[in-house]
Amino acid sequence: MSDNDGYAAPLHFGRGPTIFEVFVEPTCPFSTKAMGKLEPLLAAVGEDRVTVKLRLQSQPWHQWSGVVTRCVIAASTLPDGRDRAWDVLKAVAQHREEFVFENHATGPNRTTTPDEIIERIEGYSGFALAAAFDNPKLDTITKWHSKYARQNGIHVSPTFMVNGLIDPDLGSGDEVDQWAEAIRGAPVR
């Protein structure tokens, strides 16, 4: 168990009035591309002008999605949880092929066990996650992410919301400047 006793730190970055929510699946190639642009986005817009909120969007066609997503949430219960969860997301993104099936169905990861996935993430991130992963309180947090996405009509990742409204014109292939312009042009709610 962590020092936070199961409390998951919100995955929020920045402190500005415009809310930019990004729904990501940790092993999705498009989500990992989007996550790689978040730090440059904060630098471009300014942390005092935008709050980036990461929302986890587990998807069943990414076969290890549930285990990896739970590892991210488990990391968020550790001391400095937000940053530990971000470190886990980056570690998974950097080694994405070790957490996915080939063509969503085959390949060497098909015989991998959940414990092996957790051990890989621990090895790449440098954090012990198994005890936090076992915490039954993570179920509530995981369900919250799923319900929040469904309530907002979000089914795939990455999906982007600006001030509570889905922006279908934004995508992972966009330049950071395009995202920054959408944020700067958004009406403050």
Image: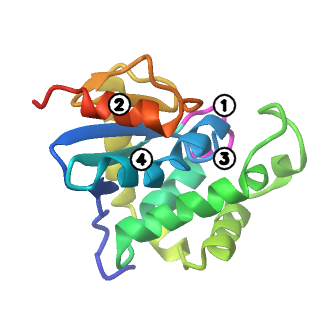
CA distance separating discs 3 and 4: 28 Å
The reply, left or right, for residue 155 in relation to residue 15 is right
Magenta-highlighted residues: 59-65
Residue carrying label 3: 64
Q: CA distance from mark 2 to mark 1?
A: 32 Å
Towards the viewer: 1 or 52: 52
Q: Which mark is residue 41?
A: 4
Quadrant of the rendering where the C terminus is positioned: top left
Expressed as whole percent of the image width and height from the top left, the position of residue 30 reads: 62, 35
In the image as oriented, which residue stretches furthest toward the left? Answer: 189
Local SS, label 3: loop
According to the picture, the residue beneath numbered tag 1 turns out to be: 61
Q: Where does label 2 land, which residue?
A: 181
**Secondary-structure class at tag 1:** loop
The residue under the point 79% across, 41% down is 101
Q: Nearer the viewer, residue 39 or 118?
A: 39
**In magenta segment, residue 61:** yes
User: Residue at (35%, 79%) from the top-left corner?
Assistant: 79
Residue at 55% across, 78% down: 127
Q: Are marks 4 and 1 in contact (CB under 8 Å)?
A: no
Which amino acid is tagged 4?
Leu
- The x, y position of residue 81, in whole percent, is 37, 70
Pointer 3 with pointer 4, Cβ within 8 A: no
